[in-house]
Image (tube, rainbow, N blue to C red):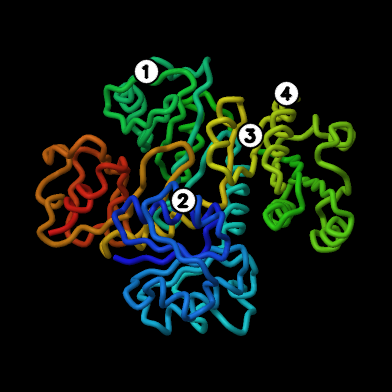
Amino acid sequence: MRAIVIGAGVVGYDVAKLLSQADHDVVVVDVDADALALINEKLDVMTVSGNGTSTAVLENAGIREARILVAVTAIDEVNIIACMLGDRLGVETTIARVRSDELTSTKTVLDSRDFGIDLIIHPEESAAAEVVRLIRRASATDVLMLADDRLHLVGLRLDPDSPVIGHSLQDLVRERPNLKFRVMAIARGIRTILPGGSERLRKNDQVFILARPKSIPPVLEMLGKSDRRLANIMILGGTDIGAKVALQLSREKNKRVKLVESNRERAEELAEKLGSCLVIHGEGTDIDLLVKEGLSEMDAFVAVTTDEESNLVTCLLAKHLQIRKTVALLSNGAYIPISQSIGLDAAVNTKLAVSREVMRFLRGKHVKSVATVHGLNAEILEIEARPMATITKDVLMNLKLPTGLLIAAVKKGNDIEIATGLTQINPGDRAYIFVMPGMIAQAEKLFDH
């Protein structure tokens, strides 16, 4: 399949790498010769120099043979026009990264379909929603909603004094037979483990637990975690993400939010827009200012400036002051393992939203969605079982599923259940499965006929 990526920046690089690794014929288009040279050096893809809004440039890139076009430049208008041209020239799927709310607002006159865009990705909005979820779930390093929010995948780092250290997963289930949950993955150092029942938990393991929302509090208690509400929150950075987080959190009962923004005009604009949120004009790197404004009294600190190093450093300061929850915006994936090693609680990454959606279109049509989690080298597929598929032949415990694949839950019509060895998947059922990168083809084969 030919795929065209418009934009050779950081996001475009990641998308091109993803498509190339899936053995697709990838062409990257950009006006920046240096960015294209880097891609040529690092990736096995073709490049075309030129503007993605030019029909001639797109023709040169082989647009008429392309099945997917992903436009991820820094300019919304370029992304929209490139997708419009792709749609007119017969591209099956067009995806545009759009930062403006104009096309996603409920009050907009035009929507994405008017421009021939199949999917609009708004990474900043997705990142803001993720930050809000992390603040609401105080002990979590990651929170992912599945099955229309009926299941939560929660990442938690085990403290050295956690009561479950040394226990096997079988022990946990046996000791709490009425608590419905499943440990789906463990991040141990740089390794990702899809565990069996005999796996024993160790200190500093990052465990990913699947459960219904109402079961999360008792699961946290089992792991020795507190889920006490975070009431006082300081946000560093009046970016789009910072403003969206502040707006959502300040509307919640019993939450007091302060936002620090270095640009005076932006601070004044946000002060009018955010209402009950206290907006402070000042440099985020001014430690005295942060302390004076009550940093040490906060329950949570969120750093979402455009300077990732500042986000890391200020979150580290907050942890030094024993702030319970710190969240940093880190668009550079290389910083995420660093943030975890130095003790930060959670990181969000705007690029992940783009990658997730592109992956969904890469998979077969029976694959309904794809998700990824920071620090976890596995994909989470929502996949529908076809008639006569191998996965439908018997209960899971008798199928001898390959290593590197774990069934998390099964959706049967309107019902959803966390999978066990006795679960039977029938044609038309949708399963949520954790898959290691090298096992994706085998996973799809199990669910196909």
Disc 4 or 2, which lies upstream in sequence? 2
**Mark 4, residue position:** 320
Disc 2 or 3, which lies upstream in sequence? 2
Q: Nearer the viewer, residue 415 or 112?
A: 112
Tell me if mark 4 has few (under 14), some (14-19) or many (20+) residues whose alpha carbon lies within 10 angstroms of its own.
few
Tell me if mark 3 has few (under 14), some (14-19) or many (20+) residues whose alpha carbon lies within 10 angstroms of its own.
few
Q: Nearer the viewer, residue 230 or 302?
A: 302
**Mark 2, residue position:** 145
Alpha carbon distance from label 3 to label 1: 25 Å
- Which mark identifies residue 167? 1
- Which mark identifies residue 228? 3
- Mark 1 residue element: loop
Alpha carbon distance from label 4 to label 1: 31 Å
Looking at numbered disc 1 in the image, what kind of residue is underneath it?
A: His
Q: Is residue 314 left or right of residue 449?
A: right
Q: Residue at x 53, y 32 (%)?
A: 337
Alpha carbon distance from label 4 to label 2: 31 Å
Q: Name the quadrant containing residue 243.
A: bottom right
Alpha carbon distance from label 2 to label 1: 27 Å
